[in-house]
Image (cartoon, rainbow, N blue to C red):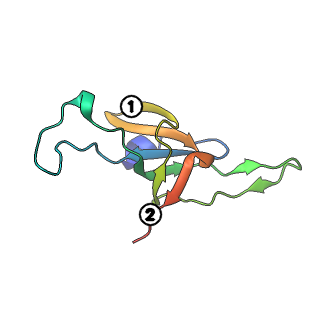
C-alpha cells in the first residue's frame, strides 16, 4: 500500500481513502453477488493534503490524519484504481466521523 499511495499527494483539503472491503456474505451466510453489495462507507486515510486556505491565504489544518479510520458519505468522492488497489479521493467535508477504538 505504501508504494501506490506514495505516488499521490492530495491537494488542499482532499484525502485519499482506502475503502473497507465490501461484504461478501450476509449475516446468515448467503453469498452476495457484486450487484447486491452495499458501497462501503468506511475506510482508512492513506494520504492527506495540507488543508484548505481561508480568505486571507492562511492554511486551515485538517481535522483528520493519515491512518485514521473514518466514515464518509455514501456517494462521496471519486473512485479510482492505482496498482490494482481501489482508492477514493474525497474532500474533508465528506468525512462524517472518525472511528475510535
- Which residue is painted at 41% across and 46% down in the image? 41
Where on the picture, by quarter, is residue 100? bottom left
- Which residue is painted at 46% across and 46% down in the image? 17
Q: In this figure, which residue is indicated by the disc labeled 1?
A: 81
Q: How far apart are marks 1 and 2 (CA)?
A: 24 Å
Q: In this figure, which residue is indicated by the disc labeled 2?
A: 99
Measured from the top left, where is residue 22 in percent x and y? Answer: 28, 42
Can the viewer see residue 35? yes
Say above or below: 44 vs 32. below
Of mark 1 and mark 2, the one earlier in the sequence is: 1
Q: In this view, does 28 lie to the left or right of 65?
A: left
Front of the two marks 1 and 2: 2
Q: What element carries label 1?
A: strand
Residue that sits furthest to the bottom in the current view: 101
Measured from the top left, where is residue 92 in percent x and y? Answer: 60, 49
Can the viewer see residue 8? no
Q: What element carries label 2?
A: loop
Residue that sits furthest to the left in the current view: 29
Measured from the top left, where is residue 93 in percent x and y? Answer: 62, 47
- Which residue is painted at 55% across and 41% down in the image? 90
Amino acid at each position: 500500500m505504501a508504494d501506490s499511495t506514495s505516488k499521490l499527494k492530495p491537494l488542499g483539503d482532499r484525502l485519499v481513502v482506502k475503502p473497507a472491503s465490501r461484504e461478501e456474505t450476509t449475516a446468515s451466510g448467503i453469498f452476495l453477488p457484486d450487484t447486491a453489495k452495499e458501497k462501503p462507507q468506511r475506510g482508512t486515510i492513506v494520504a492527506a493534503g495540507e488543508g484548505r486556505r481561508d480568505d486571507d491565504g492562511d492554511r486551515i489544518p485538517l481535522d483528520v490524519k493519515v491512518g485514521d479510520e473514518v466514515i464518509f458519505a455514501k456517494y462521496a468522492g471519486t473512485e479510482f484504481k492505482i496498482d490494482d488497489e481501489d482508492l477514493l479521493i474525497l474532500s474533508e467535508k465528506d468525512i462524517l466521523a472518525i472511528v475510535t477504538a
